[in-house]
Amino acid sequence: MRIALIAAVFALAACNPQQQAEAPQGPPTPVAIDAPSGEYALDPTHSSIVVRANHFGLSHYTLRLTGLAGQLNFNAEDPAKSTVTASVASDSVKTEYVGRRDFDEELENSQWLDAAQHPSLTFMSTAVELTSPNTGRMTGDLSIRGITRPITLDVTFNQAYRQHPMGMPLALLGFSARGTIKRSDYGMTVLLPLAAEGAGISDEVEILIETEFTQPAAPANPVQ
């Protein structure tokens, strides 16, 4: 009986909210980043944009956009104050289609990206919110076919180097990002399903981004 009473006392103590550690308050503290603040250029060789949409319920059809360019104004002391601008060439669609028709070109035409009238897709960030030490939400304005709509990207900081690990005189930053848009918001209504469960190409489109940014590294021993 005495053992049971002691066990009950310990159980009540464990349930007492005053005994539990309080959750930390305030925004997350970002991870330390060993790279300088300043302007970084997007490295198109090590960056990619993948677009996915549900294809008649069978699969998520996947394509790439390859004509990337962009700038990152990075704030190492307060990453939430960093900004990004980027553009993608509308005529840079790459798919796995192997038939006789030029399917890449068809997706660049007036029914889809309308590359002749609108040669670039553009993005300009408007705010960054940290969600954990190495993740955040970046909101911004995405323009496609001359139509601008807001988009939110879930961003993960991957790695940084004050100097390239292979010795090249470059500082590096690497990120992954993910977001979704509705293509109908940008005037692309071809093959939209007539109902929620209807056959067609989904209105919701997933955007997956992998990107590296570079900045010329400062000299190890600058001249005084």
Image: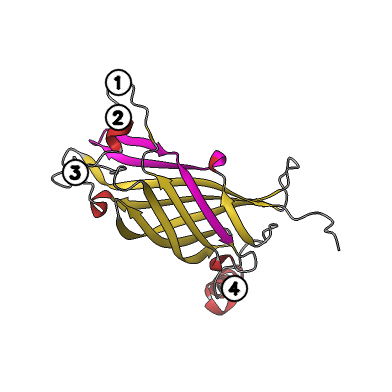
- In the picture shown, does residue 110 fall above or below 223? above
Is label 2 in contact with label 1 (beta carbons under 8 Å)?
Answer: yes
Is label 3 in contact with label 1 (beta carbons under 8 Å)?
Answer: no
Q: Is residue 50 magenta?
A: yes
- Of tags 4 and 3, the one toward the viewer is 3
Q: Is residue 89 left or right of residue 81?
A: left
Residue 59 image offset from top left, x and y in percent: 31, 34
Q: CA distance from mark 2 to mark 3?
A: 18 Å
Q: Which segment is the magenta one?
A: 45-73
Q: Which residue is mark 3?
A: 192
Q: Which residue is mark 2?
A: 103
User: For the residue labelled by badge 4, is the local secondary structure a helix, a strand or a loop?
Assistant: loop
The image quadrant where one finds the N terminus is bottom right
Q: Residue furthest left?
A: 194
Q: CA distance from mark 4 to mark 2?
A: 59 Å
Residue at 45% x, 56% y is 154
- In the picture shown, does residue 86 fall above or below 68? below
What count of labels does the image hold?
4
Q: Residue furthest front?
A: 116
Q: Residues within 10 Å of mark 4 (few under 14, many from 20)?
A: few
The amino acid pointed to by label 3 is Leu
Q: Which residue is mark 4?
A: 21
Q: Which numbered disc, 2 or 3, marks the residue that appears first in the sequence?
A: 2
Q: Which numbered disc, 3 or 1, marks the residue that appears first in the sequence?
A: 1
Q: Which residue is mark 1?
A: 99
- Of tags 3 and 1, the one toward the viewer is 1
Q: Nearer the viewer, residue 176 or 172?
A: 172
User: For the residue labelled by badge 3, is the local secondary structure a helix, a strand or a loop?
Assistant: loop
